[in-house]
Image: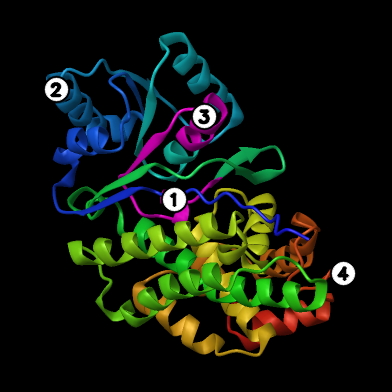
Amino acid sequence: MPFTKSKLMEFPRDVVVGHGVIEEIVDLCKKVNLGKHPLVVHDEMTKKLAGNRIMEILNESGYTVEDIVVSGATMEEVGMTQNHATKWGVSSLIAVGGGSVIDVAKLSSFNYGVPFISVPTAASHDGIASPRASIKEEVGSVSKQARSPVAVLADTSLISKAPYRMLASGCADVISNLTSILDWQLAWRLKREYYSSFAAVLAETAADLIMENAGYIKPGIEESSWIAVKSMIVSGVAMSVANSSRPASGAEHMFSHALDRIAPGKAMHGEQCGIGSIMMMYLHGGDWGKIKKAIKEIGAPTTARELGLSKEDIVEALLMAPKVRPDRYTVLGADGISREAAEHLVKVTGVA
């Protein structure tokens, strides 16, 4: 019988990371054949921070540039961006901003059928280069299939000026890959779910880079942004290899999405995933203390109080987590854990 397996893996073709690299936008657009009619997607703040400069550089180089200001990662904003792209017949999208802006551009470019460049102005989670978009719906954030950027332009001089809390949150998000991988391996062994050792190694490498450099990731140090952004890009590539969020999203992410429903807007996604990872590593029987130490060293929260949440919020999120994605098998099992077990978990890990 002939071998018939096939798989699509879409990666960023070019990644430029460093001080002042925003000035290289024209060279990058030419290199990846982005066309001469891009749509720049940004929010009010990132337009002033970097969007206006990017449009200025492109216009001076003979590009016909359109732009749109978005206000959040919702399907309404995605639809508005797609309509704008259709109206002007643009050749590509350039996302200039944080996670919400990039997610809107990512899904819009996927639906509209043109490539996009990711230009992060903050490093708050690993969506910089991933093929998934986190979109806010009534039930909370929902992960949707999108596309990876054709290129990433990460100016560390810009990213280092963003609030440090965002960088610390992004680092915690990448560290949580360590429990995502264990959950994926568990699903492979118990449910025979598809598993890619290559994708898992990439995701683990990204997390290890943050763990090993936790002591050097501090506010006001541009090199911290360099370390964090490189790790987040590798994490995004891991998801592209897997064609799934599995290498970077397990029970700790389900816990985070549950918290979004129980106490919306209290904490950042990566912060919640970091605390979730501490608890899930305990359930896996691994070195949860090592994860907690690294997250604390970076300056991200490790307790409910630091998140602005109560012990009961954490317990309820643990009980709700398996229902967030019932199709995704994790260490929490198909039926979840008991309230008694959840209360013991938050106590023994010192989370609450």
Q: Nearer the viewer, mark 4 or mark 2?
A: 2
Residue 61 shown in magenta: no
Q: Which residue is mark 1?
A: 11
- Whole-Å distance between the Cαs marked 1 and 3? 17 Å
- Whole-Å distance between the Cαs marked 4 and 3? 36 Å
Q: Residue at x 46, y 9 (%)?
A: 87
Residue at the extreme top: 87
- Whole-Å distance between the Cαs marked 4 and 2? 58 Å
Q: Can residue 105 be seen in the rendering of this structure? A: yes
Q: Which mark is residue 335?
A: 4
Characterize the local packing of mark 1: few (<14), some (14-19) or many (20 or more) Cα atoms within 10 angstroms. Answer: many
Q: Which residue is mark 2?
A: 61
Q: Nearer the viewer, mark 2 or mark 3?
A: 2
Q: Nearer the viewer, mark 1 or mark 4?
A: 1
- Whole-Å distance between the Cαs marked 1 and 4? 36 Å
Q: Nearer the viewer, mark 4 or mark 3?
A: 3
Residue kind at label 2, given as amino acid type: Ser
- Whole-Å distance between the Cαs marked 2 and 3? 25 Å
Judge left or right: residue 58 versus residue 233.
left
**Magenta-colored span:** 104-132
Residue kind at label 4, given as amino acid type: Asp
Q: Quadrant of residue 25?
A: top left
Please tell me which of labels 4 and 2 falls first in the chain. 2
Residue 123 shown in magenta: yes
Q: Secondary structure at mark 1?
A: loop
Q: Nearer the viewer, mark 2 or mark 1?
A: 1
Circles 2 and 3, Cβ within 8 Å, touching? The answer is: no
Q: Can residue 331 be seen in the rendering of this structure? A: no
Q: Which residue is mark 3?
A: 108
Residue kind at label 1, given as amino acid type: Phe
Residue kind at label 3, given as amino acid type: Ser
Q: Quadrant of the C terminus?
A: bottom right
